[in-house]
């Protein structure tokens, strides 16, 4: 079944299961009216369909703008809404695995991952942008009096810090290569306490094999002001464990001075899935190579046996025509009959091979091939058939 047809067929089931999981995410979600959940889930489902089938992101962009306003208005944390978006993957992957043919599953999941990555990053950026704009707009209003501005700005900063603490992704601020702020998720991700993280070199959280690449990015940012804002590297935990980390960073003003702020996410599962996909591609290429090798061997083997038989038959036919006696002619014809019988046996052996279905991959990731030469030799060794003249 094609992906478009599959998503249309399961549309109502996807919406129903997604709705059922939403209230379990948090207390705030559990208090939302059922009709509101139904409306947002339906819009998100259709936006995901447009992305996956039509490569149309406009519906998702419109939905993200609407949802950001709705969730910020009632105090939702970024992590709560991120988790709600992730449920679409949780609901659809089992359906894909069940209904799609194996060769199609990985490309579909890869496309789904691309959809989810775009959606969550786009939402996170928009959510943060809108929230920061709300803070800035609010700060401008505070300039009515110094006392009121100071009081309300402190309250706004406290709310922002609470938002940062609630997200699942790690958040940090660094200056001159050292961490000056980090949320709990960043600390937990690397296995440190907050006290251990603050003032520590950021490179302490990077595996040795990735430090060279990050040093180049940092140097580009310092010297040119232009460097990649999003990249993947190998993170390092306090206990020595390693994991793939995706960072999205940008320059900010923190406490009145220039700094670098970033969101980091553990993407080990996604990277491992991509490695598995590439391994399957490699195995498929290997299968094709072996199939071509088998075909070439088949042609060489058939050419050898059939050419030999044809040469003998042609020679005996000419000899029978030139025979000076009936005995010589009979001997030549007898040889021709034997070679014809061998040719028939070769064709029979080839027919048996063609009826055998292609075998699956072995544990060593190779294809088992039928030995046509062996089949032909066994056929020729069998008693020759007696032919009616």
Image (cartoon, rainbow, N blue to C red):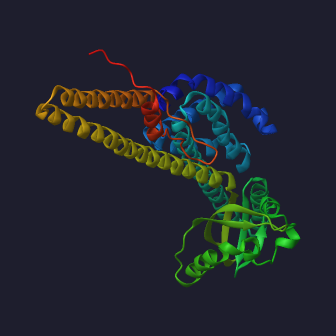
Between 367 and 219, the one lying in front of the other is 367
Q: How many marks?
A: 0
Q: Nearer the viewer, residue 252 or 329?
A: 329
Which residue appears farthest toward the top when viewing the image?
A: 388
Extreme residue toward the bottom, this view: 223
Q: Position of residue 157 (x, y in %)?
A: 76, 63
Image quadrant containing the C terminus? top left
Q: Say which residue appears at 33% left-offset and 44% top-offset.
A: 304
Q: Residue at x 49, y 29 (%)?
A: 356
Residue 385 appears at what percent x and percent y? Answer: 38, 21
Q: Is residue 84 above or below residue 198?
A: above
Q: Quadrant of residue 300?
A: top left
For the question of whether residue 173 can be seen, the reply is: yes
Tell me the residue at 63%/55% (across/down).
271
The part of the image, by quadrant, that contains residue 112 is top right
* Residue 32 appearing in the image: no
Q: In the shown orientation, is residue 176 left or right of residue 6? A: right
Q: Is residue 44 above or below residue 182?
A: above
Q: Is residue 316 above or below residue 218?
A: above
| Residue 353 image offset from top left, x and y in percent | 45, 31
Above or below residue 284? Residue 97 is above
Residue appearing at x 61%, y 42% in the figure = 362
Residue nearest the viewer, comparing 56 with 325: 325
């Amino acid at each position: 079944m094609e992906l478009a047809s599959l998503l249309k067929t399961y549309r109502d089931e996807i919406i129903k299961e997604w709705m059922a999981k939403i209230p379990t995410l948090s207390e705030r979600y559990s208090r939302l009216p059922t009709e509101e959940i139904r409306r947002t889930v339906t819009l998100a489902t259709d936006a995901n369909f447009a992305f996956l089938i039509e490569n149309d992101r406009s519906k998702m962009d419109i939905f993200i703008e609407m949802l950001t306003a709705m969730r910020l208005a009632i105090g939702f944390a970024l992590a709560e809404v991120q988790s709600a978006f992730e449920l679409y993957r949780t609901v659809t992957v089992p359906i894909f695995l069940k209904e799609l043919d194996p060769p199609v599953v990985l490309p579909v999941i890869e496309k789904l991952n691309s959809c989810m990555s775009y959606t969550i990053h786009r939402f996170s950026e928009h959510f943060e942008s809108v929230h920061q704009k709300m803070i800035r707009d609010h700060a401008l209003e505070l300039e009515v009096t110094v006392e009121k501005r100071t009081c309300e700005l402190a309250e706004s900063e406290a709310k922002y810090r609470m938002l940062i603490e609630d997200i699942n992704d790690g958040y940090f601020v660094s200056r001159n290569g050292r961490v000056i702020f980090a949320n709990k998720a960043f600390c937990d991700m690397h296995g440190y306490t907050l006290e251990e993280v603050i003032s520590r070199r950021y490179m302490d959280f990077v595996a040795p094999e990735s430090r060279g690449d990050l040093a180049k990015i940092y140097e580009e940012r310092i010297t040119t002001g232009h460097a990649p804002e999003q990249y993947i590297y190998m993170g390092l935990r306090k206990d020595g464990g390693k994991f793939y980390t995706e960072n999205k960073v940008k320059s900010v003003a923190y406490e009145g001075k220039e700094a670098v702020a970033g969101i980091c996410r553990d993407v080990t599962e996604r990277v491992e899935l991509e490695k598995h996909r590439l391994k399957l591609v490699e195995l498929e290429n290997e299968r094709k190579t072996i199939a071509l090798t088998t075909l070439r061997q088949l042609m060489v083997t058939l050419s050898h046996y059939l050419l030999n038989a044809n040469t003998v038959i042609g020679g005996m036919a000419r000899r029978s025509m030139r025979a000076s006696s009936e005995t010589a002619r009979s001997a030549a014809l007898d040889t021709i009959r034997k070679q014809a019988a061998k040719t028939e046996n070769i064709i029979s052996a080839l027919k048996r091979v063609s009826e055998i279905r292609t075998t699956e991959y072995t544990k060593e990731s190779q294809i088992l091939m039928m030995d046509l030469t062996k089949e032909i030799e066994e056929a020729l060794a069998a008693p020759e058939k007696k032919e009616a003249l």
